């Protein structure tokens, strides 16, 4: 039976949230303008209005989750993003797999942030909340799902399946409810995908806070006072957004078969660019607080950050990227709405700035080369140029769309080799940044002139050169470009460590945020250089096959074909593919797939054999996501088994084929990263023509390429799955088949009942064999076997060694820790001033 | 000249370099005909060609030729002008390859006969467009 109540509730709440957002904006404007007598009333009304908005926003989320959680597949959202087999934590991922869910998440975070601001910051409440409420109105409109004539406003997640598709079944039975949904994209069935989107969207949402304070500052003509409350939020935003980016990169590294953590895909670029500008704005804001310069620059950067977040959302969610991205985003027809959203705030910000520009205080004095302002300014400029270099080519599809909308033709395409293209700029910019942080930090903490600078830099310089020399020699870094990267990286690490040491000795840990974050930057740089620059594909195909074309021989084949049980050499390792596995609930190791037979129930299988102490033959076991196959690959060195890895693969019809996830062996100094690129499809084998063999017991013969021993036959008293009657004769042959170091016993059976012959063939998918006992010739003491062959099981695999990738991960953690320390310090500052009553 | 001016000029110079390289390194969408012309003119830059896989009358993909070691393959791509071309890809066949609605190959001509793709982007029929709702519940 179709449940329409919950969908209607969700849709109603969406409308309430939209209307209350507009009301809140209006009310706060009135509160802002009202005279002293009416102020209290307007404030109460504004807050109630925002509370209504907040509660309805939460109710939208609750309704959608109820639909997913209770498997209401009559709703399109549940049908297309979820399925019965999903565990609860992945239902959470289903929630934001669709764009509507992502918008709800964003709306939710804004409500949380808005509430915190109301409680912590009374003075700025009115102007800040006007901006918040307007943003909320735009965001809620994305999921409004209201159609007025030809105009469609928003895409509602609460539509029923029968409204979303024109499937003929709904004409016959409008109340039809599908048994199961199409499921969650398996690539998102990962713990990182449960926590990465909320983090990223909190990062997105929090960029609004500094922007709202700035708008408030412009309106109230408090051109510089907005910085103090905005700064801790800007750092918070950079920390969270940075964490979101890193989580995304880590997710890509552990679940996607891109072969790495960063691919310069438009979707990745779209979050990287606002983050760079955000970090630049933090630096100029801090400078302003110290020396009253760079106020206008800070304003421009804060506005840019917020607008770039909206621009990123537009690029990623409007469908304009089309062919340019490997991520598939469906166009929900929101592009116009997203564009208006972005242009509206751009327009408001520009108008307010232009109007107030003359009144904004500036410092006329020229920054000296020996001042910290100068170095921070150069740093912010470098960050902005980095952002500019990335956003320009990323926007090519948007440019094409714009030219075409004016009737022109543009056939520009993004650079063919994106990684090479972006790296050649970003690497050098990053080197410059690393140098700047090292020098800049010294300027920051002491007064500098030529001599003082020399003295201060000499020690870190010598240490870093020695350290670099050691790294270069030990890790064999012989490329001049990479040598420079190592030098820059170690220089920023040592210089900032010296600063950190001094700070800790002299004053409190609270001031250490900057140097910590910069040490992280240096480590990230070195980690990226090693793990990407020296990444080594070891799965080079050595099959020795010669190709018909000479040019083809010149190409490196970067995958290996592994036949089951056959040892194959791969650089330092001998690898052997051992067959498919499944994950079983409650068992930490994987279980061979061949001893599990699906029962037809979701995620349930029957054990065909005992398996260690875990379960016995005939028991029913629960499988964790039955579509997932794990391919067990053993790694040997000097004939000793070192370890085995099981990269995952899922054949998913709904998602369009094979979806692979890598498996990595993590060493302290490197990762061995492997994934399956192709596999044998044994679902519906095309058996080759019959081959018959007449063999006597004890004889040895060849079945396909396998050495096979016929060890004789037994007469059976009982037979699994069959009831033997009086007079029945059942004979089972024992065939021992050798495949490299594996010996298999295949037992085809032959039954005679009332002169009728029944044959029970055996199928071995791993060997690609079907053998049946066709006949028994007692006079000749011979048995007749019929054999059909198919493909022996195989996988095609890629393996890459990524050296020192842990340096990168540790670097990111240190950088985030640095941000956290800075947030603490700046918020503390703000709070003290506020409580003293000095803060306006 | 003030330091500020030098820096300003430096920034403008770098920005111009960035813009020029972005335009210079940008690839373009071509057809096989224009791609071949480019090869004749000695331009080896990788370009994008949008097309679809060649299919026989019954709708089955034809011309797919997987190498014996399964780590590379060739296929026939028909571009938007209807020109057929054999394309080589030095990777295993992506699993959803034959189901793709359109294929973008990024690469260039190796010689007169063969186009080598460095990268393939596929557009697969979106699951949202499924008109046939799985009628398992019937």
Image: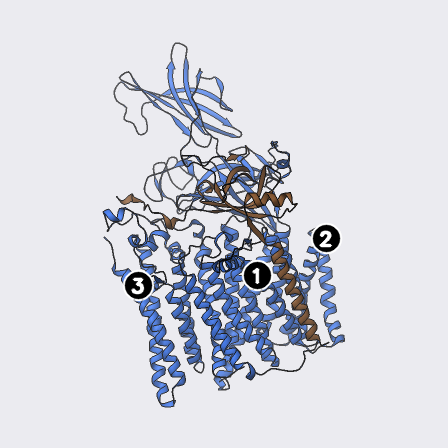
Q: Residue A834: x, y in percent?
A: 49, 83
Q: Residue pushed farthest top?
A: A779
Q: Which residue is mark 3?
A: A10
Q: Residues within 10 Å of mark 3 (few under 14, many from 20)?
A: many
Which chain is represented by brown in the image?
B
Residue at image x 39%, y 23%?
A: A772
Relative to A105, A72 lies left or right? left
Q: Residues within 10 Å of mark 1 (few under 14, many from 20)?
A: some
Q: CA distance from mark 1 to mark 3?
A: 40 Å
Above or below: residue A565 compared with residue A285? above
Closest to the camera, between mark 2 and mark 3, is 3
Q: Is residue A531 visible?
A: no
Q: Quadrant of residue A691?
A: top left
N-term mark: 1 or 2:
1
Q: Residue A258: x, y in percent?
A: 53, 49
Relative to A638, B56 lies left or right? left
Which chain is represented by blue in the image?
A
Q: Chain of mark 2?
A: A
Callout 1–callout 2 Cβ contact below 8 Å = no
Residue A35 or residue B6, whichever sits in front: B6
Relative to B88, A625 lies left or right? left
Q: Which mark is residue A392?
A: 1
Q: Which residue is mark 2?
A: A473
N-term mark: 2 or 3:
3
Where disc 1 sits, the SS reads: helix
Q: CA distance from mark 1 to mark 2?
A: 38 Å
């Amino acid at each position: 039976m179709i449940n329409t109540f919950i969908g209607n509730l969700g849709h109603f709440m969406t409308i309430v949230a939209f209307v209350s957002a507009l009301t809140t904006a209006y009310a706060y404007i009135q509160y802002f303008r009202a005279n002293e007598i009416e102020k209290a009333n307007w404030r109460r009304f504004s807050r109630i209005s925002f509370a209504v908005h907040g509660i309805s926003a939460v109710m939208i989320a609750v309704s959608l989750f109820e639909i997913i959680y209770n498997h209401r597949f009559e709703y399109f959202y549940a049908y297309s993003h979820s399925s019965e087999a999903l565990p609860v934590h992945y239902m959470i991922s289903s929630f934001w797999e669709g764009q509507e869910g992502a918008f709800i998440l964003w709306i939710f975070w804004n409500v949380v942030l808005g509430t915190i601001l109301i409680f912590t910051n009374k003075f700025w409440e009115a102007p800040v909340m006007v901006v918040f409420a307007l943003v909320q109105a735009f965001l809620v409109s994305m999921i409004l799902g209201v159609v007025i004539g030809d105009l469609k406003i928003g895409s509602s997640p609460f539509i029923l399946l029968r409204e979303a598709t024109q499937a003929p079944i709904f004409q016959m039975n409008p109340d039809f409810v599908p048994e199961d949904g199409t499921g969650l994209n398996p690539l998102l069935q990962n713990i990182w995908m449960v926590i990465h989107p909320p983090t990223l969207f909190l990062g997105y949402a929090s960029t609004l806070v500094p922007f709202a304070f700035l708008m408030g500052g412009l309106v109230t003509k408090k051109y510089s006072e907005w910085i103090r409350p905005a700064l801790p939020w800007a750092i918070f935003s950079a920390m969270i957004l940075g964490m979101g980016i890193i989580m995304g990169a880590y997710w890509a590294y552990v679940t996607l078969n891109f072969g790495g953590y960063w691919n310069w895909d438009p979707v990745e670029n779209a979050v990287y660019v606002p983050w760079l500008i955000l970090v630049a704005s933090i630096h100029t804001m801090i400078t302003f607080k110290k020396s009253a310069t760079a106020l206008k620059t800070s304003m421009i950067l804060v506005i840019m950050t917020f607008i770039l977040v909206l621009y990123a959302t537009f690029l990623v969610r409007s469908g304009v990227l089309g062919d340019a991205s490997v991520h598939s985003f469906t166009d929900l027809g929101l592009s116009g709405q997203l564009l208006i959203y972005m242009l509206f705030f751009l327009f408001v910000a520009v108008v307010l700035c232009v109007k107030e520009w003359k009144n904004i205080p500036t410092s006329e004095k020229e920054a000296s080369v020996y001042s910290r302002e100068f170095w921070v300014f150069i740093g912010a400029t470098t960050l902005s140029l980095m952002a500019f270099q990335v956003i320009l080519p990323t926007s090519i599809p948007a440019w094409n769309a714009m030219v075409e909308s004016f009737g022109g033709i543009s056939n520009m395409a993004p650079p063919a080799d994106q990684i090479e293209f972006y790296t050649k700029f970003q690497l050098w910019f990053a080197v410059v940044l690393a140098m700047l942080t090292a020098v800049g930090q010294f300027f920051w903490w002491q007064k500098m002139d030529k001599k003082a600078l020399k003295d201060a830099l000499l020690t870190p310089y010598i240490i870093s050169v020695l350290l670099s020399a050691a790294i270069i020699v030990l890790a064999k870094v012989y490329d001049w470009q990479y040598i420079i990267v190592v030098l820059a990286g170690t220089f920023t690490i040592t210089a900032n460590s010296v600063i950190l040491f001094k700070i800790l000795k002299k004053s409190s840990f609270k001031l250490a945020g900057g140097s910590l974050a910069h040490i992280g930057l240096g480590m990230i740089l070195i980690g990226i250089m090693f793990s990407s620059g020296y990444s080594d594909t070891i799965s080079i195909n050595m099959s020795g096959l010669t190709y018909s074309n000479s040019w083809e021989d010149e190409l490196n084949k970067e995958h290996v074909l592994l036949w089951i049980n056959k040892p194959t050499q791969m650089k330092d390792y001998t690898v052997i593919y051992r067959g498919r596995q499944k994950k079983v609930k409650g068992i930490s190791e994987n279980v061979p797939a061949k001893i599990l037979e699906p029962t037809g129930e979701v995620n349930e299988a029957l054990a065909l054999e005992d398996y260690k102490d875990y379960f016995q033959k005939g028991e029913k076991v629960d499988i964790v996501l039955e579509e997932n196959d794990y391919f067990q690959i053993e790694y040997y060195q000097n004939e000793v088994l070192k370890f085995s890895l099981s990269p995952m693969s899922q054949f998913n019809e709904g998602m369009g084929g094979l979806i692979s996830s890598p498996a990595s062996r993590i060493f302290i100094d490197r990762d061995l990263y492997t994934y399956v690129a192709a596999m044998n499809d044994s679902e519906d084998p095309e058996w080759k023509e019959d081959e018959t063999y007449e063999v006597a017991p004890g004889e040895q013969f060849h079945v396909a390429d396998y050495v096979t021993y016929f060890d004789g036959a037994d007469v059976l008293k009982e037979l699994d799955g069959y009831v033997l009657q009086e007079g029945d004769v059942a004979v089972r042959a024992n065939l021992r088949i050798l495949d490299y170091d594996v010996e298999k016993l295949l037992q085809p059976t032959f039954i005679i009942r009332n002169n009728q012959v029944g044959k029970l063939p055996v199928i071995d998918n791993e060997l690609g064999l079907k053998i049946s006992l066709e006949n028994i010739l007692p006079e000749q003491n011979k048995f007749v076997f019929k054999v059909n062959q198919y493909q022996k099981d195989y996988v095609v695999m890629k393996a890459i060694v990524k050296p020192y990738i842990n340096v990168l991960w540790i670097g990111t953690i240190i950088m985030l820790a640095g941000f956290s320390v800075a947030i603490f310090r700046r918020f503390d500052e703000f709070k003290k001033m506020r409580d003293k009553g000095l803060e306006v | 000249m003030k330091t500020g001016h030098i820096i300003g000029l430096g920034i403008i110079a770098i920005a111009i370099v960035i813009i020029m390289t972005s335009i210079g390194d940008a690839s373009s969408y071509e057809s096989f005909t224009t791609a071949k012309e480019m090869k004749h003119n000695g331009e080896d830059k990788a370009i994008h060609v949008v097309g679809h896989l060649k299919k026989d009358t019954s709708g089955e993909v034809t011309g797919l030729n997987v190498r014996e070691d399964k780590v590379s393959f060739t296929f026939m791509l028909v571009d938007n002008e209807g020109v057929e071309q054999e394309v080589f890809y030095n990777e295993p066949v992506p699993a959803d390859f034959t189901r793709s609605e359109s294929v973008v190959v990024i690469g260039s001509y190796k010689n007169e006969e063969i186009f080598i793709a460095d990268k393939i982007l596929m557009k697969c029929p979106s699951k949202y467009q499924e008109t046939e709702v799985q009628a398992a519940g019937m």
